[in-house]
């Protein structure tokens, strides 16, 4: 088993599949009256969050607690970090406290890679800057597999601000590893350079959502921050929504079995219409539930739980 | 003291004896009292000249001082360095440039030639008192806002024109700031993979293209700092072919390293302009061979530990260069001594207006500014073993060819047996 999960590229097909299969076992557990496993009793998991992200933090917290680990939540606000403590010094402090795993969310790309130099325990990337969010990709893959029965050969379209999206990078890497065919869709200003060479040679790019939709098994909408307008990535929220938003007419053009995903939080009415978000095709709520199972599997396997 | 360098090879030529008189000049007369140095197997080069060094004093003496930087320079074979203006306070007045110049004289290891800021506080708004710096004791000739681009085209035009009065030159840090907001590394495949904001090559090329046109229009000299892209080379090639008075530098790291080095997010590889692609590296090497790029300059940029031992995005850009420049150039180009002497001593001395440096070692009466290199020696770069106060070298652990055995500044040894004399 790998030691750290810093990038979805850390996972080969075998390891990724093992995580998804383990997550399925974990999910079965949540149907039981007692939801707890003793697997990580006596182990310490630190949630080191430099960015506010209640959703991701509580998901990791629930995952660790269901495995009986001791959980320490370390949020940068109101801590030594706000007094100017460096990542290295924080890492050495956590090391001294005996952290077996550190789950880190940070606004700087690559912060988990830096952290892994300074702690002995496992490092799990819970989102770093505009780089990656590998457990999100795992829970997305898990959701696709449970809804559609497979990942190999699946046609997945990821739509929106790919340039700034850590979710998109991790998804391209993981889905390609697992045999899915990914198409990135968005205005040219929001598609990064040389994306196929950078991430996976099978990755396709399209600037035309309407042409992609009928051939998609999965349409994954990314959050688009309205402030990107000020930086000339697109002229207005209205134009963005018209060209790249998923509304009802577009959803009707999707194949009958196709699903709609969104990593949240959503801008309803911007990249996704409320009717679409709340439709039976939408897996948005399921994704959240699956997140806990997948993170349990990741912690369990990284920490060698028995 | 007089020296006799026995059996030395000047620029790779046949072994000969080189006499350094006690008047600090090269002489053809022997002196019985001269100290004899067995220079068998050693190559003599005119003392290297760096047109782009950050000595950090005043302001960041925890990263480097004029004295520690001078020592690093001497150990790297340099006899003169041009100290960049982005100190604190900024070297934008006669007072600050004279202070740096005086600190250099007190250290006495290399000639420290201050560079003056083009604009007050490097802010790019108001021209600094360039004339006062030019007529100060420091006799500033190169002006640069290095670290920042003089982005305002009108201000750049005026600065280019204004310094003609005292034969000055503007050294431009070519970076269109609007195209590099938040930039962390070269924009391309690797930045896409790493999720770091890209610094597009065109941000450099667009400024160089504009500036060669401005220099041509007003008939002024322009020097381009740390050229890093293949596209910039093409712009310079065309401008030189038209007769524009433009010179350019390339750093050792841009001749060797690529953006792939960023993959582990170790900020020791973060530098501005950023490391580019292998294609750019090839173009820069060819440009230096062709003379489209005139000089190798180190952009020696010491940083304190805490400014590098952190997240990539928070780290300061820059890397050490003085003690590794010649070995890197040797490893890239081999023992092309004439080329090395021109690009690392003669041409930079000419650009900086440093008479007395980059002289002809075979000519009696030339100032005895030279360095002795053992080209057969190999050494492993250990960050803690460098003379710089900082240790942010990107070459840690690499085995490099060429060791500096001795350096002489006006006939006085600053380095002997590979060690600084003071």
Image: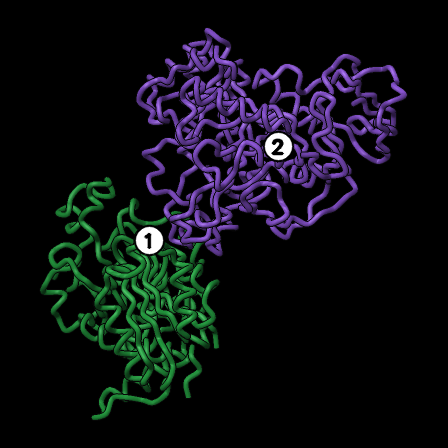
In the displayed structure, does residue A266 sit left or right of residue B229? left
- Quick one: A74 or B61, which is closer to the camera? B61
Q: Within 10 Å of the Cα at label 2, are there few (<14), some (14-19), or many (20+) other Cα atoms?
A: some
Name the residue beneath numbered marker 2.
Answer: B286
Residue A27 screen position, x and y as percent: 28, 84
* Residue B136 circle label: none
Q: Quadrant of residue B121?
A: top left
Looking at the image, the residue that sits furthest to the top is: B165
Tag 2, which secondary structure?
helix
In the displayed structure, does residue A92 sit left or right of residue B403? left
Instruction: Name the subunit of mark 2.
Output: B
Q: Is residue A290 above or below residue B399?
A: below
Q: Is residue B57 above or below residue A121?
A: above
Chain letter, green in picture? A
Q: Is residue B344 visible?
A: no
**Chain B pictured colour:** purple
Q: Quadrant of residue B144?
A: top left
Task: Give the quarter of the figure containing the C terminus of chain A.
Answer: bottom left
In the displayed structure, does residue B107 sit left or right of residue B262? right
Q: Is residue A162 above or below residue B4?
A: below
Tag 1, which secondary structure?
loop
Residue B390 screen position, x and y as percent: 54, 44
Residue A110 screen position, x and y as percent: 41, 57
Q: Are marks 2 and 1 on the same chain?
A: no
Q: Residue visible at 34% across and 77% down?
A: A150
- Quick one: B394 or A288, which is closer to the camera? B394
- Quick one: B29 or B363, which is closer to the camera? B29
Q: Residue visible at 48% across and 34% down?
A: B56
Instruction: Name the subunit of mark 1.
Output: A
Q: Is residue B122 above or below residue A188?
A: above
Name the residue beneath numbered marker 1.
Answer: A84
Q: Residue visible at 41% across and 64% down?
A: A91
């Amino acid at each position: 088993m790998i030691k750290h999960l810093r990038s979805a590229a850390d996972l080969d097909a075998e390891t990724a599949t093992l995580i998804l299969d383990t997550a399925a076992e974990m999910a079965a557990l949540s149907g039981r009256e007692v939801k707890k496993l003793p697997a990580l009793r006596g182990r310490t998991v630190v949630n080191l969050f430099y960015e506010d992200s209640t959703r991701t933090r509580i998901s990791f917290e629930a995952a660790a607690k269901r495995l009986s680990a001791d959980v320490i939540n370390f949020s940068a606000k109101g801590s030594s970090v706000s007094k100017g403590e460096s990542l290295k010094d924080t890492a050495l402090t956590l090391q001294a406290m005996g952290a077996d795993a550190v789950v880190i969310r940070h606004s700087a790309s690559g912060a988990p890679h830096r952290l892994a130099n300074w702690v002995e325990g496992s490092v799990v990337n819970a989102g770093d800057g505009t780089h990656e969010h590998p457990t999100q990709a795992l829970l997305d893959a898990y959701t696709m597999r449970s809804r559609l029965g497979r990942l190999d050969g699946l046609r997945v379209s990821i739509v929106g601000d790919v340039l700034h999206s850590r979710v998109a990078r991790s998804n391209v890497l993981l889905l390609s590893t697992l045999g899915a065919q990914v198409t990135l869709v968005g205005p040219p200003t929001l598609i990064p350079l040389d994306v196929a060479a950078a991430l996976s040679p099978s990755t396709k790019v399209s600037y035309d959502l309407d042409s992609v939709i009928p051939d998609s098994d999965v349409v994954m909408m990314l959050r688009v921050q309205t402030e990107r307008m000020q930086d000339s990535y697109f002229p207005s929220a209205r134009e963005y929504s018209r060209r790249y938003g998923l509304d009802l007419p577009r959803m009707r053009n999707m194949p009958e079995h196709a699903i709609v995903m969104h990593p949240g939080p959503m801008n309803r009415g911007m990249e996704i219409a409320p009717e679409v978000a709340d439709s039976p095709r939408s897996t948005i709520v399921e994704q959240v539930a699956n997140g806990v199972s997948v993170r349990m599997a990741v912690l369990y396997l990284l920490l060698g739980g028995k | 003291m007089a020296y006799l360098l026995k059996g030395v090879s000047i620029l790779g030529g046949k072994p000969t004896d080189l006499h350094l008189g006690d008047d600090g000049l090269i002489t053809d007369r022997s002196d019985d009292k001269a100290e004899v140095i067995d220079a068998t197997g050693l190559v003599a080069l005119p003392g290297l000249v760096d047109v782009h060094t950050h000595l950090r004093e005043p302001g960041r003496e925890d990263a480097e001082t004029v004295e520690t930087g001078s020592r690093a320079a001497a150990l790297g074979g340099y006899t003169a360095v041009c100290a960049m203006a982005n100190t604190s306070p900024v070297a934008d007045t006669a007072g600050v440039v004279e202070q740096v110049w005086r600190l250099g004289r007190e250290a006495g290891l290399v000639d420290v030639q201050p560079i003056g800021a083009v604009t007050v506080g490097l802010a790019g708004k108001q021209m600094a008192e360039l004339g006062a710096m030019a007529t100060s004791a420091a006799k500033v000739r190169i002006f640069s806002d290095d670290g920042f681009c003089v982005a305002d085209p009108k201000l750049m035009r005026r600065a280019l024109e204004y310094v003609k009065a005292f034969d000055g030159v503007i050294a431009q840090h070519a970076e269109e700031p609007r195209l590099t907001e938040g930039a962390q590394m070269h924009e391309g495949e690797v930045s896409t993979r790493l999720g770091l904001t890209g610094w597009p090559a065109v941000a450099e090329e667009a400024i160089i293209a504009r500036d060669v046109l401005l220099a041509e229009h007003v008939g002024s000299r322009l020097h381009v700092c740390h050229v890093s892209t293949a596209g910039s080379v093409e712009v310079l090639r065309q401008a030189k072919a038209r007769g524009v008075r433009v010179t350019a530098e390339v750093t050792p790291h841009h001749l060797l390293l690529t953006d792939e080095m960023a993959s582990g997010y170790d900020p020791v590889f973060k530098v501005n302009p950023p490391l580019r692609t292998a294609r750019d590296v090839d173009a820069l090497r060819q440009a230096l061979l062709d003379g489209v790029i005139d000089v190798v300059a180190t952009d020696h940029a010491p940083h304190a530990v805490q400014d590098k031992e952190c997240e990539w995005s928070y780290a300061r850009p820059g890397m050490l260069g003085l003690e590794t420049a010649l070995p890197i150039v040797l490893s890239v180009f081999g023992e092309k001594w004439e080329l090395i002497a021109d690009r690392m001593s003669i041409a930079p001395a000419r650009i900086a207006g440093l008479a007395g440096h980059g002289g002809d070692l075979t000519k009696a009466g030339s100032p005895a500014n030279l360095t002795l290199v053992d080209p057969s020696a190999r050494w492993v770069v250990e960050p803690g073993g460098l003379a710089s106060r900082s240790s942010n070298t990107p070459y840690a652990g690499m085995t490099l060819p060429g060791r500096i055995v001795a350096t002489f500044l006006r006939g006085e040894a600053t380095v002997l047996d590979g060690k600084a004399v003071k």
